[in-house]
Image: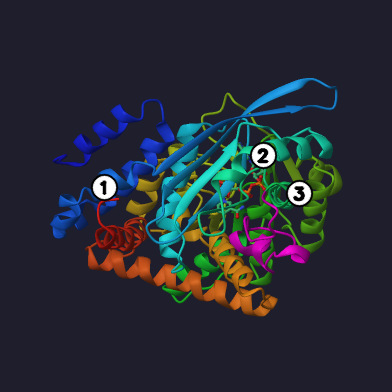
Amino acid sequence: MAQNVSSFMENVVAKNPSETEFHQAVEEVVESIWPVLDKRPEYRKAKILERVTEPERVILFRVPWVDDSGEVQVNRGFRIEMNSAIGPYKGGLRFHPSVNLGILKFLAFEQVFKNSLTTLPMGGGKGGSDFDPKGKSDLEVMRFTQAFMSELFRHIGPNTDVPAGDIGVGGREIGFMFGQYKKLANEFTGILTGKGLNWGGSLIRPEATGYGAVYFAANMLETNNDTLKDKICLVSGSGNVAQYTIEKLLDLGAKPVTCSDSGGYIYDEAGIDRDKLAFIMDLKNVKRGRVSEYADKFSSAVYTPVNRDLDYNPIWDHKADCAFPSATQNEVNAKDAGNLLKNGIFVVSEGANMPTVPEGVNQFVDAKILYGPGKAANAGGVAVSGLEMSQNSLRYNWTREEVDQKLHGIMKSIHDASVAAANEFGTPGNYVNGANIAGFVKIADTMLDQGVV
Ligand code: NDP
């Protein structure tokens, strides 16, 4: 048995070489839960930590398909079935050229604790492909997703593993994959979440991650008797999470001033209002265009293209109150975190998964700002996916108000459980420790109940 965090991590690194994002995600959790292991020796005896850092199953497969010019393309498909202690594997599929085993293992690992926090019975998984949907025609996307599902379908099921969307996987991709699953399995069942409303989807699922991240920020502010009203907010990304983060910020009277894509970002000092948000949604979801076009349309905005020579991201270098990183992992580096603090940011609520590097997280925690890590703050998406599964089992649909109310309640219970665990282990206000500990204890106790499997 490893004697301390660093010797435990040496083993993880040796066993999983080159998987840097996975090492990063594991180390953060292990640091938080080490005091719990000291208090609960039965977890050490049952090797809970060694078991939760090893996926229950990894599926890796070839995805051959034919592009519009008739050329054969070969991508790689993955599904990481990380932990099924408390329910069927659940977590998104990511289609992005950067996808590799280490990134998906980090995401699956995070998902286990996130799902545990939601209070719903869902295990953790993640999957995807190095396929890049950008610049592909609808027919190419359809052929690829059908090829992807032709293998994945034999590994998933409504009581086994229920994937959802993530970067590069939205309503269009879920639709094509659902159609292919239905054809191959000859079964109409709740095999994916994020489905269309006509065929088993849930109201509020598209909105859930962004809305949830804003509810989480509001919950954190409430501990200081404060609200989001009139707060100036930096948002990164312009996809699913960013769009609905902006929408909910507007609902609650805040002023979002930025959004971005992989080409650059816009800063709109006048604020992104509802009409401008409608433009972004049409640009990104229908026209599949670039965020730079926002600045062509609205003169109040300045577009700054990505500059790879800079050692910081200028989107995080504006005066504001709150930040909602909603694009991708490690998008806030140590210098960015310093810039955010320097510019007066006192709330960070992470819509993306692990968007802040560890040195950045430490700066937020040391500065004692209201910092909601992704595992807690972005759990609204998977929570409503869980509610979609419940509605599919019931063969019934709840109203928009019912789902939103449940989402609200779940985000509040995640917040309160994180606060309580942080207090219990002597680090009040530290949502990183709180979320990791609260998520872990439920999984660990369940694994003890279920024996060595
Ligand atoms: P989308 O594909 O809808 O949007 C992603 C956005 O981030 C796009 O604007 C994209 O720009 C940008 N982006 C992606 N990769 C990079 C990169 N390497 N550098 C700069 N910009 C990048 O994805 P989502 O909104 O669904 O996901 C965003 C984040 O939220 C991810 O971290 C995801 O894991 C997390 N998340 C998502 C959930 C969901 O329900 N969808 C649930 C919980 C977490 P471009 O178009 O140029 O690629």
Q: Quadrant of the N terminus?
A: top left
Residue in front for this viewpoint, 289 or 110: 110
Question: How far is mark 2 from mark 1, CA to CA?
Answer: 34 Å
- The figure's colour scheme reads rainbow
Is residue 317 visible to the viewer in this orientation of the structure? no
Residue, disc 2: 150
Q: Is residue 200 magenta?
A: yes
> Which kind of residue does numbered mark 2 sit on?
Ser
The single residue placed furthest to the front in the displayed view is: 186
Q: Which residue is mark 1?
A: 49
Which quadrant of the view contains residue 373?
A: bottom left
Residue 351 horizontal/vertical position (percent)? 55, 54
Q: CA distance from mark 3 to mark 1?
A: 38 Å
Q: Residue at x 74, y 49 (%)?
A: 183
- Residue 154 image position (x, y, % from top left): 58, 44
Majority secondary structure in the magenta region: loop
Q: Position of residue 99 (x, y in %)?
A: 56, 33
